[in-house]
Amino acid sequence: MTKDSPSPTERKLLSIIHRHISEHGELPTPGQLADDFGEKANYLHNVIKRLEIKKFVEKQGNLISITKKTEKYFSGALKPTRPNNVAPTQIQIVGTVKAGKTTTEELEVELSGNGEFILLPETKLEKNSYALKVTGKSMEHEGIFDGDFVIVEEFDGIDWPKHGDLIVAKYYPLENEKDNPVDDIPESEFMDLTLKIYSEQMNSNKKVYRLGWKKDNQSNPNIIFASRLIPKGRAIGVYRNLRTFKFSS
């Protein structure tokens, strides 16, 4: 990431601004962004100011608009790797993802991949997609087992997950935020990729991200509460090789 590139927090705000414009057909005010951004007003204004300096947004009175630089920044992110009507479709395996809590250095997706592919018959893909091998058992409750492959539709930096989406994401634990609150955190300090169901909830009047199972089951010991999130993609399918798969007893 270059000095002029948006930080994870700045990308989040750009996504919220873009979504507001798309859904409402009008430019938002800072007040309209506050609930989705989930931070205090003065911090929101600081992030807007940083994006102004980097020329990703412009203020029109009290309204916020995105610039051509923002459109250009995201324009090359979604490039289908094959014609949509080709069958079978090859999905490259680019790494692994843990179905549970991770550390800052535990897992890393290498987009160069290892040359291995999954073949899916007559599959139409509208966005760039890849496969990750699942490690761990904490998503068996959702029918996803150790050794399965999830097919991930890549987020472009503007996209943001919806409630109930199965996502692949880096996260910053809520307990870390409480111990050491700062304005912005580099991506290198986020926990590495996890595979979880996405939802949001309020904690002490602040929005937090809940990564767990689809049903709100407090008995789940693998729930992750995060203060910050970098969503990398949405899982749109699960592939399992029944010739090699073995259910754990």
Image (cartoon, rainbow, N blue to C red):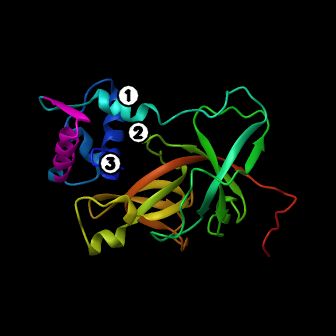
Q: Nearer the viewer, mark 1 or mark 2?
A: 2
Badge 3 element: loop
Depth order, front residue of 24/154: 154
Q: Amino acid at mark 3?
A: Thr
Pointers 3 and 1 in contact (CB under 8 A)?
no
Badge 1 element: helix
**Is 12 rendered above or below residue 64?**
below
Q: Amino acid at mark 2?
A: Ile
Whole-angstrom CA distance, mark 2 to mark 3, is 18 Å
Q: Is residue 56 magenta?
A: yes
Would residue 117 appear left or right of 200 to someone viewing this image? right
Pointers 2 and 3 in contact (CB under 8 A)?
no
Q: Quadrant of residue 220?
A: bottom right
Q: Which residue is mark 1?
A: 22
Whole-angstrom CA distance, mark 1 to mark 2, is 11 Å
Q: Which residue is mark 2?
A: 158
The span picked out in magenta is: 43-60
Looking at the image, tell me whether mark 2 or mark 3 is earlier in sequence order: 3
Q: Residue furthest left?
A: 61
Q: Amino acid at mark 1?
A: Ser
Looking at the image, tell me whether mark 3 or mark 1 is earlier in sequence order: 3
Q: Is residue 238 magenta?
A: no
Badge 2 element: loop
Pointers 1 and 2 in contact (CB under 8 A)?
no
Q: Which residue is mark 3?
A: 2
Assign the C terminus to one quadrant of the image. bottom right
Q: Residue at x 27, y 44 (%)?
A: 4
User: Which class describes the residues within 10 Å of circle 3: few (<14), some (14-19), or many (20+)?
Assistant: few
Q: Residue at x 78, y 73 (%)?
A: 248
What is the count of numbered marks? 3
Q: Main secondary structure of the magenta part?
A: helix
Whole-angstrom CA distance, mark 3 to mark 1, is 28 Å
